[in-house]
Amino acid sequence: MSMITIRGRLTLWYAAVFVATGAAVLAAMYYLVRREFISAGQAVIDGIGTPVAVEPSGVAPSGPGAHPSAMAGTPLPSVSAQPANVEAATTQARTDALRTIVLDTGALFAVLTVVSLLLCWLVARRALRPLRQITATAAELSHDSLDARIALPGPRDEIRTLADAFDAMLDRLQRAFRSQRLFVANASHELRTPLTIIRTAAEMALDRETRPEAQYRQALATIATAATRSDAILTSLLHLAQTRHSPTRTPVDLDRLAADAAAAWPADAPRLRTHLDAAPCTGDPTQLELLLRNLLDNAVRYNTDPGEVWLATGRGDRTCWLRVDNTGPVVRPGDVPALREPFQRGATRTGTTGAGLGLAIVDAIADAHGARLTAAARPGGGLTVTLTLPVR
């Protein structure tokens, strides 16, 4: 059976159902016809074998001149027919009729079985046409071509649900591949920039046999700065890759993570204000700590001087939340979604630029935890970023 195609299996199943139901109908019909034949034959035999008597209607006249018709009113002897021959003839007729019914219906059943196999084959082909369309669409797809969609019309049955799920999967894959290509292109560009600086500084230092010590020191300082930048980019990329894995699920108190971060707040950073209420949740403590650290680093980096940062935690009926607000340059509301993409940067308070992966890492960690991350521009400048998780 495993070597037969699904169309062949459907045909055999349809035909088996037809054969089973048809055989049941024929058996029931044969039983009912046989019962009626026996009942009708027995009724005929019983009717023939019953004695017939004529009751007297009056006193017959006597004498030599009495008319013969006057004898009609006299009792007649009972007539009892012999039913043996009639019963034998009835039984033979019944047997012949049943044999004819069996042969004729059996022949008709065989013909209908063959016809049903053909019809079931055609019906299975019609029923499996959407699956062939799904297969053809899947065969057309490739890494570089994910635009094909099934878009199956018709009622929302099991096949339509499968086709819609397949289209939704293709939508997700297309977005993922597009994001991956963009990410790889941006990462290559970001890593090429410090490498170019390092190579340029080294070539300038080596294009002469001797140079003053100050020029060598300047070239080495440039190389060290570029190497530090490359290390920061690679570290951020490693963190971003680690967030793609499923996080461990252990009890975590967001308020405690926030309190530890506030205790380690640098002295030269903008002023930090905290309002920490209990916020118990379940998640990966390491990833959630990395998320909070990136939010606070962004709040410090993309701020004004002097500026402020607000850190708050709390809980609702079924959720707990963590919120980071910061002052900073005015951000247009339409530019906020782009800040969550990799390698997107804003104006910094120190003039230095980061890797542009902070909010991308935060977004990836939130997505891995099934949390909701919202970012909004503050009216006076800066951002408000809120993480919402199910309460423990």
Image: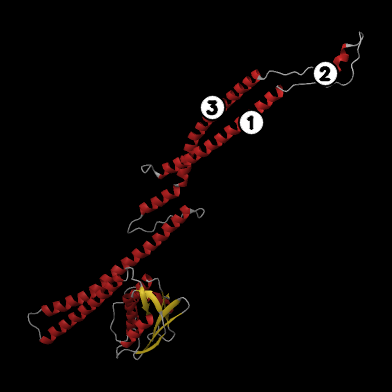
Q: Residue at x 47, y 39 (%)?
A: 16
Q: Residue at x 88, y 14 (%)?
A: 70
Quadrant assignment, res 184: bottom left
Q: Residue at x 37, y 71 (%)?
A: 369
Q: Is residue 124 visible?
A: yes
Query: As rendered, which of 275 and 84 lies closer to the eye?
Result: 84
Q: CA distance from mark 3 to mark 2?
A: 52 Å
Q: Which residue is mark 1?
A: 36
Task: Indicate the secondary structure of the residue bearing disc 3.
Answer: helix
Q: CA distance from mark 2 to mark 1?
A: 38 Å
Residue type at numbered disc 2 = Pro
Q: Which residue is mark 2?
A: 75
Extreme residue in the top direction: 64
Quarter holding the N terminus? Answer: top left
> CB atoms at circles 3 and 1 under 8 Å apart?
no
> CB atoms at circles 2 and 1 under 8 Å apart?
no
Query: As rendered, which of 261 and 211 lies closer to the eye?
Result: 261
Q: Which residue is mark 3?
A: 103
Quadrant assignment, res 228: bottom left
The residue carrying pointer 2 sits among few (fewer than 14), some (14 to 19) or many (20 or more) residues within 10 Å by Cα, namely few
The answer to which of marks 2 and 1 sits earlier in the sequence is 1
Residue type at numbered disc 3 = Leu
The answer to which of marks 3 and 2 sits earlier in the sequence is 2
Q: CA distance from mark 3 to mark 1?
A: 19 Å
Residue type at numbered disc 1 = Glu
